Amino acid sequence: MEREIVLLPKEKWKDYVLPIGTVSDTYYDMEIVPLDSEGCTVKLVKKPAVPRIVHTPDEWGYPDKLYQEYRENAEAYGVLSEDGNSLLACIEICTEEWSNRLIVSELWITAELRGQGLGKRLMDTAKKRAKEQGRRAIILETQSCNTNAIGFYLHQGFELVGFDTCCYTNDDINRREVRINLGYIM
């Protein structure tokens, strides 16, 4: 049975907390030869994570939520439980008008539904909306330690468009959690 993806009205789903966490046995290490007058070299190398990297939904005190105030023109789509009161999966997108891009700000699927093609269907929803709106690209952020997500995004046609080595702390490389920006060019 294919589960239906529906629009999640802001009035009902605003501030809905998504239980996003990650566990990873691998990560992408950043090997950077610093920029000088000749250039620089950046290499992402997949390595084993020992100890494994675990991030829980509440560890930073800023849980992922739908329809946060700073996300202009956000739209969320998801799969609901049978009673319609809880989410089983969702994607949130919002526009970045100045650059004519669509941002995937949230993507979450309950563990029980992973591996069934739902992530692809949710991402296809974002791609469809980007095309309807005439956007030139879709962008998203993930972390170098979220190798499962990176693999999924690469399989969906995304490519590396940037990174930030001090987004979360001043020691992101050593913490094995660097912000990775991926883009899908329309």
Image (cartoon, rainbow, N blue to C red):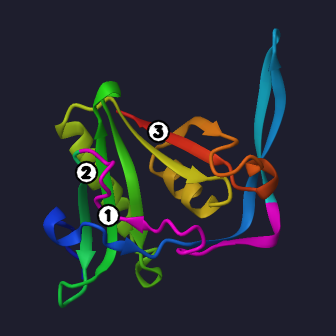
Spatial CA span between label 3 and label 2: 18 Å
Asked whether disc 1 touches disc 2, contact meaning CB atoms under 8 Å apart, the reply is yes
Neighbour class for label 2 at 10 Å: few (<14), some, many (≥20)? some
Q: Is residue 23 left or right of residue 152?
A: right
Q: What residue appears at the point 42 percent right and 79 percent down from the top-left corner?
A: 110
Residue 184 in percent (x, y) is at 42, 39
Mark 1 / mark 2, whichever is N-terminal: 1
Residue at 17%, 39% (x, y): give it.
132
Task: Find residue 74 and name its label.
Answer: 2
Residue stretch rendered in magenta on the structure: 48-72
Q: What is the x, y in percent for residue 18?
A: 40, 72
Mark 3 to mark 1: distance in Å?
21 Å
Inter-mark Cα distance, 1 to 2: 9 Å
Q: Which residue is mark 1?
A: 66
Check the image and report above or below for 62 versus 140.
below
Quadrant containing the C terminus is top left
The disc label shown at residue 183, or none: 3
Give the amino acid at mark 1. Answer: Leu
